Each structure stands twice: as structure tokens, then as C-alpha cells.
Image: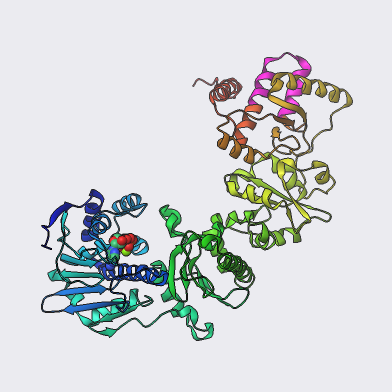
């Protein structure tokens, strides 16, 4: 067979873009190119090992599975050779020449926007940039590769990383695997130095599951630390392993190392990262644990091994009880895998429980960083009791927005006989503290949990009760008669005069009038028992969803109608008393309608239902204009 003529291909635009960023902004961290090449070699070895264990008849099946690195200072080259799965010509063109990884477009955008070189290095370090990073140090790269498929021809790929590459099938005897010959740039001679390359491997690739040899000498020493007894492992080893797995520049917040013998046998090391990197929003594929069977990697980042709400956890699990030749498709239904998942969840939850008890500061860090996803645990019906103990909330009994309470602590502060855990949802502590619905709770000194995220309300409804005893009740659904029985803890400074019998009668009529004005926009108008400082508010009728939940449902259903609620009026508020006087003088005074409309729309605005503020603003302007007429200085012309 004659050697075929090499064809020239252009890199895809995004590859050029990435190359540009890599070559120009990552000078200080160039060494990670080696980590990337080694990790590709290791992936290729994992793939071929998987084929071999499945019984596939692979080419050169007796080759040892290992990575060899040859350095030549005279030629200024670094060559990395693996005996992995190799590539056919089509595969080379498809895999090396485009960026297939999902999210790479956003990733590039993030990178391009980042001006701080250190952050660029961090982002790249965190996500891995793959093969192209080699061009940070290379003036030319030659890949020779032979697929594990027996009749596939070997392929050679050559590029200087400047816009295009050449590729052709070749007529040479080549053994299975991939050889990457890196012709180093003049300013990258260090990467042909034995000590330097060994140092990089120790730093970034020490846990690779295959031997890495530099000029014949094995360099990586740490393999399968999860199989070693916990007592023999040092903090540094865990941290190093974490860094190896995640590329996270920060050490982990905590780790869980478990070794289980029954009902299934497995070992696992799970890490809780210090930071939730999902803010980049490109990390969807970054969920799950690496799944090993007897030290053989079966699946990288297997997401089904943990429930979604524990998706922040990184790490691995290794079990001899999973069949080695299991197909990726049937993993999910495998009984052993299901059992492992159940045990892992229990392990994580009890670990968090211990952390909360023994190291509240650390727990708070965990909560602040990962609670958004963790809260989805309300769907894990089998573990709700444990889950509930791990929840934290801000509350009216705490001083600052960052302070947190557990449900157990809330219960310990309850009023005698109280069986409800009250909560309210809002955008911020400031917003909630001025919410009229809370006035009676403040007056009676009853604690209310402050919820700031939409998911919180699902948590409440999902749990229903705490410890099977204390019901979660939204403030707007609270049975006010229960609160009224409690003694006031705040005394009001201004004494309010009782209404006379006659006034009460007129007031009833005024309520009727308000009902007429609001018509079928409300279900009822009544005297409020919850208000103290505000003139009026809207309340959900019994059995209705909370406002927050309604809003979520409305967004889901694309529904923009305003739900009908009860309009409550604070009989003792100055404004309402003034309205009563105006009504007494002239029940038809137009100011009454204006004021009621304004109060109603203000309440809608507070609840987040007012979609068109025009009328409200016009009315406000009119009222301000009129009241300015009464201002002592408004007619003063000097
Ligand atoms: P990633 O490893 O994240 O997929 P890379 O840019 O590192 O991205 O590699 C791109 C692809 O090229 C790999 O997915 C793989 O298919 C192929 N590849 C790279 N190096 C090798 C290798 N040594 N052996 C076999 N295939 C390789
Ligand atoms: Mg890679």
C-alpha cells in the first residue's frame, strides 16, 4: 500500500480562538499541557482496557498498558507514547481539529472576557483545555496513531498550530496506540529536562492509574489511595488527589472516605469543594463520581451514582461487585450500583450531620456555597428526616441576613403550645422586614423563617411537617386567632382611641363601600387582626397557595391574571380613621375611592402582582399635588 497524499485541513474557528488565548495569555502556567496530554493518554488506555475486559479482539493485545515519555534535549523534543485505543483517520479529523466538548462556546467567551491572567489560568486549570494546550510549548506537533481495530491503517497528523493541520494514512509498521511528538519552542526547553518533567507529573498526574515512565523510569507513585486504610493517609494526600480529580486550585472543604463491606463491597472518596464553580454554568457534565471496578475506570463522572441534590460532591467509587464488562447503558439498572448509591447518600448525610454538630463554621461554609442544589433533597423521600435536620434558614429571631438557624433551634424557641413553624418568602431581609403580614408576628414575638429562594417554598411543601409534629405554615395562611391569644411583646407608643358604638356602625358601612369599590377583584374585605403599622394588606384565602407559590405556578403556566384575595383593613390606622371621618361627612366623597384604589394597588405592588404601574403612579402624582397645596410653604412666594 502506497502512502497516501496528506490532505490539509483548516482548524474550526473556535479552535483558532482557543489557540490564540492559550498561546498569548497562559505563559505562566504552560506546564499544564503535559497534564492534558497524559490525561488523554490515560483516557485512551482506559478505553482499550474496557474493550479488552469485554473480550473484544483488539490489535496488539499483549502490549503493556502504560504511558512512556521520551525526552531529547539535543533535538528539543518531548514525545509521549501510549498503548491506548488509538484513532482511525476519521477519528483524528473529528477529534483533533474541532472542540466537541459541550459548553466550549461559553467557555471561550468566559475566557475571552477575562483579562486577569491568573483567572485565565484558574479557569483553564479548572476545566481542562485538552489537546490544544500543547501549542503553548510546541512549534510543531506530530501525532502517529494506530487504532485498536485490527484492520485500521495508522495515521499521521502534523501541525504547527497556526490555522491548519495535515493528515494522512501511512504505510509504516505502527503498534496500537498514540505517539505525540512535541517539537518544543526555543523558550520551552525546560520541558525536555528530565527533572522538570518528573516534577510536573508528580504535581498534576501523580494519581494516573497507569504507569508513567520518563526515559524508562516510573514516576507516578500514588495509585488507588482509596484502597489504603484511612489511618495511613495524610491530609496532603487527600488534597493532592482532590486536585488531581478536579483541577480545583483550592483545597477541598472536606472529604468523606468510606470503605464498606456489606451489603455491597466498595470504597469511595468523596470531596466537598470549597466553592461552587457552577456559577460558570458550563459544568453540567461535571457532575458525578468516577466509577471504578477493581481499579479499572468504567465511567468518568458517572452522574447517576448520586442523586441530583448531592451533585456538588466530587470523587470516585470503586467496587469489585459490579461486573467489569457491564455496558454503560445498563449501569443504571444494576442492583449493585443502586445499592451503592443508597449507601453513599446515607454516608454523605450523616457526615454533614456530624459536621454541623462538631464544626458549625465549616458547615456554614458548606451551606452558603452548596445549599442551592442541596435543597433539592426535599425530593428524596427516603431520607427526609435527616435532610430536614440539615436545613438552615435565616429568621426573624436572628440579627443579620447571613445568620442561620436549624429547624431544631427554631423549635426550641417556640412559644408554649406552638405547633407551627411559620415562614415567609421574599427577595431580601429588608423586603421581608417591612412586610405587613409580619406585623402581628413581631407584636407577639413569634419567630418566622425568612426564605429567599423559590426552591425554599418547595422544600416547605415537600416536608409538610418537621418531626411529624410541627407543621410548616406560610405567614399569610396563619390562623391569626392562635396568635392573638399570645401576649404582646411590643407595646405600641401611640394609644389608639376605641371606636364608639356609632362609629363602629359607620365603619361597617365604610367596609361595604370598600367592597363595592373593589368589586370582584377581591374575595372579601374585612378588619385585620394582623396589621399594626400598615393600613391594609392582601391575604390569601384558606386553602389557596401562598403568593410565592402562585407566582411560580403562574410563570410555569404563563398565566398573568391577578389572583383574588382578601383585602384586610387596619381599623386603628390613622389613614383608615381619616377615611372614616371623610365618609361620615360625605359617603360619596371621591377621595374615598381614590384612596381605596391606591391602597389596593399598593398591596398588589408589595405582593408582586402589579403588572401595570401607570394608574398607580398617576394617582400618586395627583395625591401629592393636592397634598402639596396644604404644605405651609407652598404659597410662600418670596
Ligand atoms: P477531551 O480529552 O476533553 O475530549 P482533548 O482536546 O484533550 O479533549 O482531546 C480531544 C479528543 O481527541 C479526545 O476526546 C480523544 O477522542 C482524542 N484523543 C486525544 N488524545 C488521544 C490519545 N492519546 N489517544 C486516543 N485519542 C486521543
Ligand atoms: Mg483531554
The magenta segment: 575-599
Q: Return the x and y of residue 4 as percentages of the image width and height.
A: 12, 59
Q: Can residue 398 be seen from the camera position used here?
A: yes
Instruction: Please say whether residue 390 is one of the residues in the magenta stretch.
Output: no
Q: Return the x and y of residue 131 as percentages of the image width and height.
A: 26, 63
- Determine whether, in the image, residue 632 is placed left or right of residue 526: left
Residue at image location 62% in from the left, 76% down from the top: 262
169 and 378: which is toward the camera? 169
> Which corner quadrant of the image does residue 247 belong to?
bottom left
Q: Return the x and y of residue 81 as percentages of the image width and height.
A: 24, 74
The N terminus, quarter of image: bottom left
- Determine whether, in the image, residue 193 is placed left or right of residue 330: left
- Marks counted in the figure total 0
Our reading of the magenta stretch's main secondary structure is helix
Instruction: Please say whether residue 580 is one of the residues in the magenta stretch.
Output: yes
Give the quadrant of ligand 1: bottom left
Q: What's the coloring here? A: rainbow
Residue at image location 73% in from the left, 25% down from the top: 578
Q: Return the x and y of residue 516 as percentages of the image width and height.
A: 73, 18
In the rendered image of this protein, does residue 456 appear above or below residue 552?
below
168 and 239: which is toward the camera? 168
> Which corner quadrant of the image does residue 570 belong to?
top right
Residue at image location 44% in from the left, 68% down from the top: 298
Amino acid at each position: 500500500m502506497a502512502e497516501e497524499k496528506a490532505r490539509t485541513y483548516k482548524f474550526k474557528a473556535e479552535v483558532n480562538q482557543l489557540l490564540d488565548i492559550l498561546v498569548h495569555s497562559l505563559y505562566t502556567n504552560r506546564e499544564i499541557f503535559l497534564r492534558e496530554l497524559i490525561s488523554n493518554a490515560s483516557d485512551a488506555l482506559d478505553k482499550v482496557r474496557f474493550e479488552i475486559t469485554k473480550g473484544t479482539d483488539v490489535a496488539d493485545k499483549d502490549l503493556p498498558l502504560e504511558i512512556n515519555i521520551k525526552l531529547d534535549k539535543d533535538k528539543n523534543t518531548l514525545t509521549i507514547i501510549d498503548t491506548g485505543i488509538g484513532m482511525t483517520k476519521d477519528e483524528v479529523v473529528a477529534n483533533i481539529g474541532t472542540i466537541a466538548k459541550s459548553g466550549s462556546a461559553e467557555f471561550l467567551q468566559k475566557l475571552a472576557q477575562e483579562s486577569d491572567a491568573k483567572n485565565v489560568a484558574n479557569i483553564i486549570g479548572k476545566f481542562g483545555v485538552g489537546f490544544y494546550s500543547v501549542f503553548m510549548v510546541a512549534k510543531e506537533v506530530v501525532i502517529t496513531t494506530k487504532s485498536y481495530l485490527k484492520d485500521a491503517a495508522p495515521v499521521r497528523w502534523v501541525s504547527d498550530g497556526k490555522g491548519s493541520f495535515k493528515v494522512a494514512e501511512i504505510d509504516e509498521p505502527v503498534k496500537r496506540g498514540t505517539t505525540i511528538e512535541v517539537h518544543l519552542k526555543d523558550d520551552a526547553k525546560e520541558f525536555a529536562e528530565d527533572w522538570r518533567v518528573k516534577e510536573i507529573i508528580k504535581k498534576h498526574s501523580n494519581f494516573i492509574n497507569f504507569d508513567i515512565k520518563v526515559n524508562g523510569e516510573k514516576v507516578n507513585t500514588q495509585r488507588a489511595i482509596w484502597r489504603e486504610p484511612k489511618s495511613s493517609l495524610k491530609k496532603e494526600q487527600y488534597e493532592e488527589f482532590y486536585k488531581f480529580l478536579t483541577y480545583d486550585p483550592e483545597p477541598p472543604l472536606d472529604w468523606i472516605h468510606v470503605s464498606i463491606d456489606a451489603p455491597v463491597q466498595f470504597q469511595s472518596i468523596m470531596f466537598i469543594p470549597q466553592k461552587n464553580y457552577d456559577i460558570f454554568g458550563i459544568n453540567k457534565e461535571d457532575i458525578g463520581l468516577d466509577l471504578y471496578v477493581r481499579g479499572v475506570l468504567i465511567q468518568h463522572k458517572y452522574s447517576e451514582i448520586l442523586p441530583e441534590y448531592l451533585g456538588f460532591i466530587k470523587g470516585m467509587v470503586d467496587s469489585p461487585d459490579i461486573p467489569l464488562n457491564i455496558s454503560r447503558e445498563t449501569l443504571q439498572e444494576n442492583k449493585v450500583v443502586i445499592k451503592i448509591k443508597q449507601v453513599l447518600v446515607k454516608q454523605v448525610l450523616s457526615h454533614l450531620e456530624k459536621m454541623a454538630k462538631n464544626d458549625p463554621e465549616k458547615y456554614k461554609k458548606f451551606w452558603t456555597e452548596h445549599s442551592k442544589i442541596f435543597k433539592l433533597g426535599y425530593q428524596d423521600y427516603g431520607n427526609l428526616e435527616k435532610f430536614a435536620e440539615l436545613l438552615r434558614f435565616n429568621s426573624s429571631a436572628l440579627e443579620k441576613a447571613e445568620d442561620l438557624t436549624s429547624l431544631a433551634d427554631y423549635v426550641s424557641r417556640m412559644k408554649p403550645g406552638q405547633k407551627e413553624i411559620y415562614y415567609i418568602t421574599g427577595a431580601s431581609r429588608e423586603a421581608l422586614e417591612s412586610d405587613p403580614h409580619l406585623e402581628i408576628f413581631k407584636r407577639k414575638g413569634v419567630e418566622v423563617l425568612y426564605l429567599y429562594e423559590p426552591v425554599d417554598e418547595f422544600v416547605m411543601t415537600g416536608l409538610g411537617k418537621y418531626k411529624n409534629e410541627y407543621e410548616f405554615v406560610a405567614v399569610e395562611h396563619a390562623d391569626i386567632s392562635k396568635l392573638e391569644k399570645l401576649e404582646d411583646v411590643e407595646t405600641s407608643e401611640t394609644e389608639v382611641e376605641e371606636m364608639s358604638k356609632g362609629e363602629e356602625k359607620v365603619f361597617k358601612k365604610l367596609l361595604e363601600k370598600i367592597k363595592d369599590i373593589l368589586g370582584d377583584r377581591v374575595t372579601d374585605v374585612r378588619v385585620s387582626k394582623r396589621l399594626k403599622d400598615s393600613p391594609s394588606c392582601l391575604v390569601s384565602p384558606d386553602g389557596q397557595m401562598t403568593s410565592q407559590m402562585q407566582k411560580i405556578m403562574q410563570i410555569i403556566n404563563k398565566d398573568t391574571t391577578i389572583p383574588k384575595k382578601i383585602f384586610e383593613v387596619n381599623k386603628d390606622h390613622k389613614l383608615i380613621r381619616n377615611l372614616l371621618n371623610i365618609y361620615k361627612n360625605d359617603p360619596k366623597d371621591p377621595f374615598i375611592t381614590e384612596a381605596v384604589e391606591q391602597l389596593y394597588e399598593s398591596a398588589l405592588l408589595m405582593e408582586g402582582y402589579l403588572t401595570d404601574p401607570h394608574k398607580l403612579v398617576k394617582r400618586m402624582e395627583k395625591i401629592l399635588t393636592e397634598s402639596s397645596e396644604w404644605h405651609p410653604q407652598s404659597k410662600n412666594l418670596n
